C-alpha cells in the first residue's frame, strides 16, 4: 500500500502566531519540530496499517520545513515548489491508494483559527460552486482528480468539521481550536498519539468510502483584500472581474481551476 501525505503547519498543535510559522523568527524551530513529529506519527500509523511506502509532501511556505531524518525510513520527502498546479499535492497520482493531510487549517475568512487563510494572505475568500473553500477542499478535489481518496486529516476543529461535511467517512483529529486571536491545544504528545492511531484506523478501514466525486462544473469566485490584485488577476485567460475585489472563473475541468489558483494567488 502506497500512501500520500500532505503537511502544513498552521493546523499543527500549538501554532497560534505567524512568528511560529516562518523560518526567520526564533519561535519557528519549536513548531517545525512539532510539525515533523506529527508527520512522523502519521507515517508510523500508516506503516502499522500495512503501508509499504509513504510519500510526504512538505507543503508549508518554503516547503523546506520537515526534518527528514526524523521520519521513518520508508518515507520519501517532497521539498520545494516545482511550479506544478497540484501545489500542496505535488507528485500525487493514481499509484497511491490513499491520501492523508496533517496540520491543515481553517479557510480564509474563518474564525476557527487565528492563522486561517487559503493559499495566499492576499485572499479574503475563495468560493467553489458557492461553497467557501479551504486548502483542504482544494486539495481534496485534487486527490479526487487523481482518483485517490482522502481518508484522514488533522488540524483545527473548524477544519475537521469542514472535512467531515465534505467527506462524511473521513477520520479526523482536531488538535486545537481557535478563540479570537488565541488557540486551545492538546498536549503535543497526546496529539501525536491520536494522529498515529487515527491514521492507522483510517487505513485499516474501507478506503472507498472516502472517495470524493468531483462536480461536473466549477464556478469559482476569488475575492482579494486589495482591488489591485483582483484587477491584475482578471486578465488570466477565462477570468472576469465581478466587482472591484472579486474575479470569477468557470470550467468543467478541475485542472483548469488549479491552474487559475496557481497563477493568480
Image: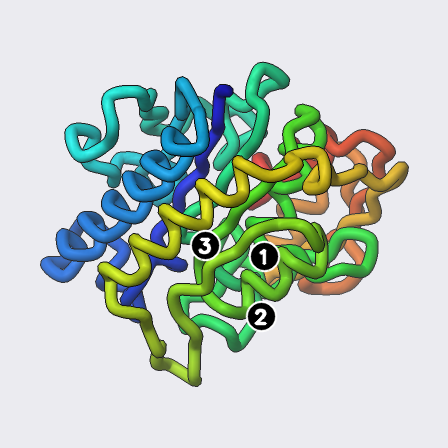
- From the viewer's perspective, is residue 7 above or below residue 4? below
At which x and y percent is residue 186? 31, 70
Query: Camera-side residue: 196 or 104?
Result: 196
Which mark's residue is nearer the viewer, 2 or 1? 2
Query: Camera-side residue: 139 or 189?
Result: 189
Crowding at dot 2, Cα within 10 Å, few <14 / some 14-19 / many 20+, comes out as some
Query: Which quadrant, please, contains the C terminus?
Result: top right
- From the viewer's perspective, is residue 134 above or below residue 93? below
Seen at 80% across and 38% down, the residue is: 213
Q: How much space separates mark 2 and mark 3, taking CA atoms?
A: 20 Å
Q: Which residue is mark 3?
A: 154
At which x and y percent is residue 96? 56, 21
- From the viewer's perspective, is residue 196 above or below residue 146? below
Under tag 2, what secondary structure? loop
Seen at 55% across and 62% down, the residue is: 159
Judge whether residue 197 can be spotted in this image: yes
Crowding at dot 3, Cα within 10 Å, few <14 / some 14-19 / many 20+, comes out as many
Q: Give the label on residue 228, or none.
A: 1
Q: Which residue is mark 2?
A: 109
- Badge 2 or badge 1: first in the primary sequence: 2
Crowding at dot 1, Cα within 10 Å, few <14 / some 14-19 / many 20+, comes out as few
For residue 58, which quarter of the picture?
A: top left
Seen at 41% across and 18% down, the residue is: 52
Amino acid at each position: 500500500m502506497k500512501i500520500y501525505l500532505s503537511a502544513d503547519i498552521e493546523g499543527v498543535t500549538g501554532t497560534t502566531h505567524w512568528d511560529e510559522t516562518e523560518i526567520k523568527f526564533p519561535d519557528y524551530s519549536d513548531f517545525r519540530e512539532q510539525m515533523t513529529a506529527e508527520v512522523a506519527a502519521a507515517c508510523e500509523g500508516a506503516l502499522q496499517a500495512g503501508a509499504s511506502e509513504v510519500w510526504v509532501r512538505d507543503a508549508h511556505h518554503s516547503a523546506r520545513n520537515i526534518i527528514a531524518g526524523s521520519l521513518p525510513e520508508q518515507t520519501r520527502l517532497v521539498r520545494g515548489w516545482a511550479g506544478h498546479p497540484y501545489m500542496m499535492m505535488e507528485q500525487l497520482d493514481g499509484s497511491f491508494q490513499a491520501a492523508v493531510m496533517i496540520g491543515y487549517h481553517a479557510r480564509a475568512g474563518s474564525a476557527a483559527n487565528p492563522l486561517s487563510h487559503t493559499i495566499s494572505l492576499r485572499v479574503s475568500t475563495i468560493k467553489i460552486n458557492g461553497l467557501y473553500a479551504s486548502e483542504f477542499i482544494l486539495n481534496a478535489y485534487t486527490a479526487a482528480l487523481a482518483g485517490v481518496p482522502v481518508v484522514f486529516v488533522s488540524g483545527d476543529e473548524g477544519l475537521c468539521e469542514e472535512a467531515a461535511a465534505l467527506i462524511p467517512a473521513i477520520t479526523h483529529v482536531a488538535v486545537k481550536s481557535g478563540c479570537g486571536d488565541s488557540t486551545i491545544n492538546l498536549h503535543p504528545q497526546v496529539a501525536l498519539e491520536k494522529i498515529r492511531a487515527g491514521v492507522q484506523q483510517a487505513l485499516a478501514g474501507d478506503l472507498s468510502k472516502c472517495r470524493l466525486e468531483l462536480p461536473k462544473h466549477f464556478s469559482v469566485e476569488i475575492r482579494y483584500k486589495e482591488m489591485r490584485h483582483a484587477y491584475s488577476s482578471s486578465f488570466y485567460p477565462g477570468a472576469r472581474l465581478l466587482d472591484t475585489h472579486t474575479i470569477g472563473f468557470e470550467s468543467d475541468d478541475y485542472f483548469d481551476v488549479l491552474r487559475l489558483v496557481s497563477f493568480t494567488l
